[in-house]
Image: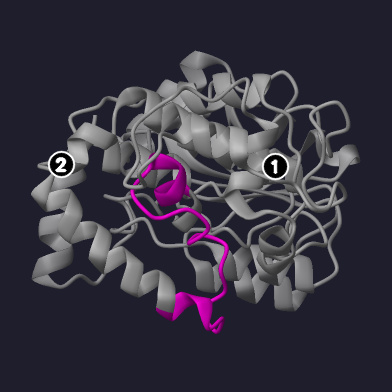
């Protein structure tokens, strides 16, 4: 999220990619404190900076750098507090028109330290300068000026737009009879898995899935389904990094995962999350059973189960919600997301 904060204009330039152990961080912290005092005196407020154009810039840079699926949750949430409405479809629109010019772990081989040495966010902005909309920042210059003055010091780390790692940006939004919307980090998916069909293997908890991986009851080509992990179902929409890492660590190369939970920036492979509506709220992901054939087509943005609509509706009436031990706080959290999606809509 440091990248998003910098492109939104809410942090000083170069802060996002400077490593925590770099001595430069101390100076940046000092300069940040000074600038905050100046902004207060200038009567500049966060909402003056976090405009719709600023959020579009943040999404574009995120897509160009490979994108964490988490930003599809964080950016709309921040935008809502700023009085700006951001729909998940905007991520897909911007991703389709923004080449992926950075290849960062786990999707690639470079680290954030490499991006920093190659020019940092100003360097990435320079590559995208014809696409970036001019907005105010906490710096004393607008984002467009920062983009024009940015320098790229390594073309292999921050590529030219005409020589991208991938023709599209980091995130794709999939739709179909399983989901009104779902997100995947497409730049971290092997080419042969961009289109895949396979039988479902359904698990209702992380523990069940991990046990199945250990027992080797999952086969190459299977599509693992992990429902009831959303904001209401879990409750809390937990991060599904452990299951994705376990699948990869077990040596599977052609196993996909679909969940209404979320992922972290470290997720790679054909892992589809944020499925809406979530199973707890009647989403079709909760109606999938072992053996149902799942069709995934990332280039065409589709996600479907080979079931007739009538069959899905029939199963929705029969689907049982798994029991969860909950504290009063989690129960309250679940109640807030009952009947709405993970974007609060």
Find disc 1 in the rendering and name its residue.
291
Q: Secondary structure at mark 1?
A: loop
Q: Is residue 12 above or below residue 49?
A: below
The residues colored magenta run 4-26
**Would residue 162 be visible to someone looking at this image?**
yes
Q: Residue at x 30, y 50 (%)?
A: 231
Residue 317 x, y percent position in the rendering: 33, 31
Mark pair 2, 1: CA separation: 54 Å
- Going by the image, does 83 lie left or right of 43? right
Residue 245 x, y percent position in the rendering: 68, 69
Q: Is residue 259 above or below residue 331?
A: above
* Viewer-side residue, 79 vs 73: 79
Find disc 2 in the rendering and name its residue.
45
* Viewer-side residue, 177 vs 37: 37
Magenta stretch, main secondary structure, is loop
Which quadrant of the rendered structure holds the C terminus?
top left
């Amino acid at each position: 999220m440091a990248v998003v904060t910098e492109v939104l204009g809410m942090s000083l330039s170069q802060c996002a990619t400077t490593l925590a152990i770099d001595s430069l961080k101390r100076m940046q912290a000092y300069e940040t404190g000074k600038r905050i005092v100046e902004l207060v005196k200038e009567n500049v407020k966060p909402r003056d900076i976090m405009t719709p154009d600023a959020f579009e810039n943040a999404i574009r840079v995120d897509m160009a750098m490979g994108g964490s699926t988490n930003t599809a949750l964080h950016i709309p949430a921040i935008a809502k507090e700023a009085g700006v409405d951001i729909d998940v479809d905007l991520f897909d629109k911007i991703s389709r028109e923004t080449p992926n010019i950075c290849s960062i772990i786990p999707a690639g081989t470079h680290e954030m330290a490499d991006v920093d040495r190659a020019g940092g966010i100003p360097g990435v902005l320079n590559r995208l300068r014809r696409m970036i909309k001019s907005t105010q920042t906490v710096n004393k210059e607008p984002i467009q000026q920062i983009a024009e003055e940015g320098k790229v010091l390594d073309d292999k780390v921050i590529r030219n737009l005409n020589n991208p790692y991938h023709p599209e940006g980091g995130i794709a939004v999939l739709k179909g009879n399983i989901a009104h919307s779902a997100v995947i980090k497409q730049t971290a998916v092997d080419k042969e898995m961009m289109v895949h069909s396979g039988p479902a293997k359904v698990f209702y908890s992380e523990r069940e899935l991990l046990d199945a991986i250990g027992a080797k009851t999952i086969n190459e080509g299977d599509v693992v389904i992990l429902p009831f992990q959303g904001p209401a179902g879990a409750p809390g929409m937990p991060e599904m990094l452990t299951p994705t890492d376990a699948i990869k660590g077990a040596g599977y190369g052609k196993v996909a995962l679909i969940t209404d939970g979320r992922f972290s920036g470290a997720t790679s492979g054909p892992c589809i999350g944020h499925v809406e509506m979530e199973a707890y709220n009647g989403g079709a992901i909760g109606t999938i059973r072992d053996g149902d054939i799942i069709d995934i087509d990332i280039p065409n943005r589709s996600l479907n189960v080979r079931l007739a609509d009538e069959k899905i509706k029939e199963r929705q009436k029969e689907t049982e919600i798994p029991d969860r031990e909950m504290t009063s706080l989690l129960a309250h959290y679940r109640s807030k997301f009952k009947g709405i999606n993970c974007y609060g809509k």
